[in-house]
Amino acid sequence: MHRPHPTEVYENEVKDLLSRMTVGEKLGQLQQLTWTGGTGPGGGQTEEVERAARAGLLGSVLNLHGAAHTNTLQRMAVEESRLGIPLVFGLDVIHGFWTTFPIPLAQASSFDPEVAVRDAEVSAKEARSNGIRWTFAPMMDVTHEPRWGRIAESCGEDPHLNAVLAVAKTRAYQGDDLAADDRLAACAKHFVAYGGAEGGRDYNTVDVSEQRLRNLYLPPFKAAVDAGVATVMAAFNTVSGVPAHGNPHTMTGILKEEWGFGGVVVSDYTGVEELIAHGYAADGADAARLALTAGLDMEMVSTHIAGHGARLLADGLITEERLDDAVARVLALKFALGLFDDPYTDESAAVDEPTPTARAAARYTAARSMVLLKNDGGALPLDAAASGTIAVAGPFADHTDLHGTWAGPGCRRFPSVSLLDAVRAAAPAATVTHAGGGAEAVAAAARAADVTILAVGEEPGLSGEAAVRADIALPEGQAELIAAVAATGKPFVVVLLNGRPLTIGDWVDGVPAILEAWHPGIEAGHAIADVLFGAVTPGGKLPVSFPRAVGQIPVYYNRENTGRPHDPGSDEKYVSRYLDLADGPQFVFGHGLSYTTFTTGEPRLGRPVVSVGELDDGTRIDVRVTVTNTGERTGDEVVQLYVHDPVASIAQPVRRLRGFERVTLAPGESRELAFTLGADDLGFWTNDQNGRYVIEPGAIDVYAGTSSRAEPRATLTVTR
Ligand code: BGC
């Protein structure tokens, strides 16, 4: 079904306006400047912003929020400029504005699109009431790189999981009407393959085959475009040698022509200027020409398109048609946002703090996003009614900044609930003690306690943009804390607060229970306590593999086989393996335990045979899977459906996630879940630059289970 884009809906209004604009005014609409950010490249552009707004030479502003602040600037644009075209205010509302939700990687661990929806709805309401109309989210960069700090912002290593959450978030930010006073325009970023940065080094080279681009990196973007995402942001990296900001193949060929994207493609921060440093553009004018011609519509922070556009046009180096198309996209977005009807924000209706409902949503989603990695001998849950002593220890025991990277303005005003406070509240009969970072003090507290909760992990600044780590073990001294507590012989559990998978092989065996809490946001402590004491039974799953060692990276579940796979039972030398490390990750994609246990039955196919023609015509195969809670508590399981095409003209990943569902079951309860597999699940993109998707005849293995280790259970035959 074709969903009309703003450029079609507002065609007449846009045409009329365009016909009255000078070249300078048109170029101005393609410019976005930053209000703050004086420390980053580009600096703060405050005075320049006001001047450009008054002159009608500015399209958008980022990093300014507040109803009154944005109204003041908006008045300059609307009342003082010749045509009175309103500005659109953008901000990185990534996992919250005032109310910080768990980081996106955590949200992905929930395997529950509703978690993304709750974040987006609260975020949109808070941000919109503070003048923001456009968020630079969701980020949907599939990545196999735990060293890369921006893995915290992504939904991990699987394209399907990224796509499902990207769609949920996009729809929830945007709603049915972008002009509604509780919605935002969304931005699919970063286009494209940013997660493939070599060595995980941010902004780095990505040399990628067409098939991998299309099978791994593009699917979430395609899904977001189909869901009507209003804007797309270009990525900082090169794609096979051509920087994404100047890449006609990705921005125009695929995004705009193949997919029919009618929205705005915005650059990343100084991304146009960076075409020079990439060694792609000779100077600013050249960068502007390359970016605009390749399909970029709006320049963030650097000013080359606006600065050189008129000259480039006069010299015939850019076309009027392309310029008008870019401007039309920006204007249509503004019409869709209702800015021409009412450019201002109601100052009396601004939400200025997290409401109790928003906090409850943050707590619920954070607890739902946690992953129980290990739980030997039922170390967890702890007994909330017990009257003994609980030591809350480690560098994150009393920490109130558990917001994680890219938290909104709320992270500076509203501290996270600390774990210590939350444990006190959750276990009122217990004596709760606290020991911070020193090994001796922590060990003494552990000796004196009946149980110790040891909170370790990464400071928020260790993940996120330009926060790459070469060694992804716990930061210095923390493994020693674990060893010191383990040496006491007393019961203890470890809570991990981190923005990426960590290498934990050095200590994992000596710890009875590990709860991966990620960076849980404003309600962090309460959400962790909910899980530790069993008010919430953990049900999250890993959206990324946990490597055993850095030297093994990248290690991911959706890998291809080799000609010489290693059979773990054999010591054959000439096979694909490390001599000094066990095969595979420490914890696989999709892993996560519960306080109860589950079994899944065989996947049952609605029919065993289907033809390529039927699939092309839209036939979908029913797949039924029964899941049973075999334990003694109510809990959640995420049933995961994977496929593998064992013989294909392009070697296929050994597993590809194609469906998942999180269900809550009472003890002894069974449920039959229904999935379907269709053309989009059973084929793959080839290396054809023009985009060729094929479904090949043959067998497809279908697996269902509770992690990516799901065993083979059914075979579907695809006939010619
Ligand atoms: C990031 C983007 C972000 C932009 C605006 C850049 O540095 O890469 O993800 O949206 O800044 O803040």
Image (cartoon, helix red, strand yellow):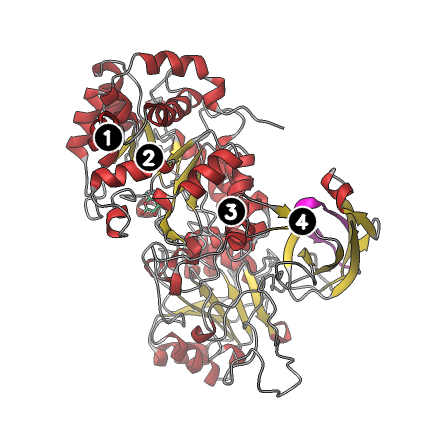
Where are the magenta residues, as a range? Answer: 661-680
Q: Determine contact: label 3, label 2, CB under 8 Å.
A: no
Q: Which of 2 and 574 is in front in this view?
A: 574
Whether residue 355 is visible, yes or no, is: no
Task: Report the Cα–Cα distance between label 3 and label 2.
Answer: 21 Å
Which callout, 2 or 4, points to the residue nearer the camera? 2
Could you tell me which secondary element the residue under label 2 belongs to?
A: helix
Whether residues under marks 1 and 4 lie with C-beta atoms below 8 angstroms apart, the answer is no
Q: Where is mark 1, residue-wise?
A: 312
Pointer 4 residue: 681
The spot of residue 480 in percent (x, y) is 39, 80
Residue 286 at what x, y percent from top left? 24, 40
Q: Which mark is drawn over residue 689?
A: 3
- Tell me the residue at 77%/50% (across/down): 623
Q: Is residue 673 magenta?
A: yes
Q: Mark 2 points at which residue?
A: 292
SS for dot 3: loop
